Image (cartoon, rainbow, N blue to C red):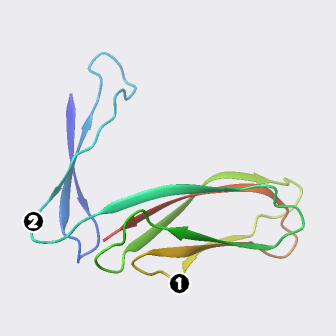
Amino acid sequence: MNIAVTVFMFALAGTFNVILGLDNNSTQTRGLASTVKRSDPTRDFRIESGSVYLHPWTGVKEKKVAIVFRQAFSTLPYIVLQPTVLDLDKNFNTRLVIKAIDVTQNGFVLQVYTYADTILYAIEVTWLALN
């Protein structure tokens, strides 16, 4: 069974078709694959991704990590950030900020900080850069 999904990714990037392959004998996804097709072949479209694991975090309220792309983008990329691991103290409120700052065609700085009484032991942030 194939499911066709149309994804609209920013007005400048255009429309992309993503095909997800699912196993016919199961409700679980297996061999998940995707194909991205450009609606405008004249545009230079590229995606790069990675993740950063910050541990130990004890006593620190802010960390910055320089991310360097494997290959420079031809234009300034959009950056999408997603926390994928959070190890927090359950007895305190969760106050967490994740930002991409100083974005260039060659990379960006990942900024993670907590405030007030939040106690964070570790965090992993997955990032996606696309133009």
Q: Quadrant of the C terminus?
A: bottom left
Helix, strand or loop under label 2: loop
Residue shown at the point (37%, 75%) measured from the top left = 77
Q: Position of residue 74 (x, y in %)?
A: 28, 76
Residue 106 percent location from the top left of the image = 43, 75
Mark 1 vs 2: CB contact within 8 A = no
Marks 1 and 2, how far apart at CA: 29 Å
Q: Residues within 10 Å of mark 2 (few under 14, many from 20)?
A: few
Within-10-Å neighbours for mark 1: few <14, some 14–19, many 20+: few
Please give the residue where the numbered disc 2 appears in the rendered image. Answer: 41
Q: Is residue 76 above or below residue 88?
A: below
- Residue designated by label 1: 102
Query: At which x and y percent is residue 34?
Result: 27, 43
Q: Amino acid at mark 2?
A: Pro
Q: Is residue 78 left or right of residue 37?
A: right
Of the pair 4 and 13, the residue shown nearer to us = 13
Image-based side of 86 in relation to 131, left or right: right
Q: Find numbered disc 1 in the image and state the secondary structure of the residue it sits on.
A: loop
Residue located at (40% from left, 26% from top): 28
Quick check: 91 left or right of 126?
right
Question: What residue appears at the point 11 percent right and 63 percent down from the top-left corner?
Answer: 39
The first of marks 1 and 2 along the sequence is 2
Q: Which residue extends farthest bottom? A: 102
Q: Amino acid at mark 1?
A: Asp
* Among the 4 quarters of the image, the one containing residue 112: bottom right
